Amino acid sequence: MKQRNPVPEILTSPTRYFIIYFLFGSTLFGLVSSGLSTLFWDRFIPWLERKLTVDSTVMVPGVVISLSLFVLIIVYFIPFFRLLKRLQSLVFSSPETEVEANVKKLEEHLPGLITIMSPKEDSPAERAIRHHLNDDRLPHLKHCWLICTPKSQPVAEKLDQRFIGEGLGQRFQLHYGAGYRMKDPDSPDDPEAEMSLL
């Protein structure tokens, strides 16, 4: 197996490599800012004043205002950071590796199922439930707990009605929503500590 390049990981996780970031960043920032400041204010501005024959009392405020406007334009009107991120992914990305999925077909049918309800009509939860119903052969699904969000609870209710309409509602129990409450095992006597599937 090929060794991964550690540079992208170091660059993208400052909390994990805080000391490296701090030492490298503070040193580099100090050197670069000092060098650029010296180059710009001590070398470029006097040269520009001589070329344009402009007084420094006019030149320095003009340059400061121009640089401020330039930074504002870069920050607010150009997707500069998106471009930097794209450049970073191009420069530091590791070569594409082929991902192999090792998916095994589920042959087992279980009497209990806990699944997450999707807000879509064609939910993966429904496919999982139908698989474990096992065409009413034994073993088949007896209890199913659907974990819902407020958006997916109406879809769970429609799914329950669809199962009842197909005659499957008598074969297993579907538990979902805020109406299904369980006692908290850590504090079974506290009614405030009940848990729901919503």
Image (spheres, rainbow, N blue to C red):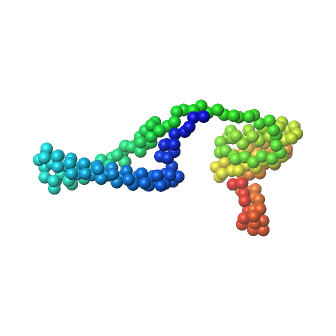
Which residue is most to the left? 53
Work out whether residue 109 can be spotted: yes
102 is higher (above) or lower (below) than 153: above
The answer to which of 184 and 98 lies nearer the viewer is: 98
For residue 65, side relative to residue 104 (left or right): left
For residue 194, side relative to residue 97 (left or right): right
Work out whether residue 165 can be spotted: no
For residue 136, side relative to residue 28 (left or right): right
The answer to which of 68 and 31 lies nearer the viewer is: 31
Which residue is most to the bottom? 189
Residue for point 60% across, 34% down: 1
The answer to which of 54 and 46 lies nearer the viewer is: 46
Residue for point 80% across, 44% down: 164
Residue 51 position within the rendered picture, expressed as x and y whole percent measured from the top left: 13, 44
Specify the quadrant that holds the C terminus: bottom right
For residue 64, side relative to residue 20 (left or right): left
The answer to which of 130 and 89 lies nearer the viewer is: 89
Residue for point 56% across, 37% down: 3
Residue for point 75% across, 66% down: 187
94 is higher (above) or lower (below) than 63: above
Residue 75 position within the rendered picture, expressed as x and y whole percent measured from the top left: 37, 48
Q: Quadrant of residue 194?
A: bottom right
Which residue is most to the right? 138
Q: How many marks?
A: 0
Residue 162 position within the rendered picture, expressed as x and y whole percent measured from the top left: 76, 42
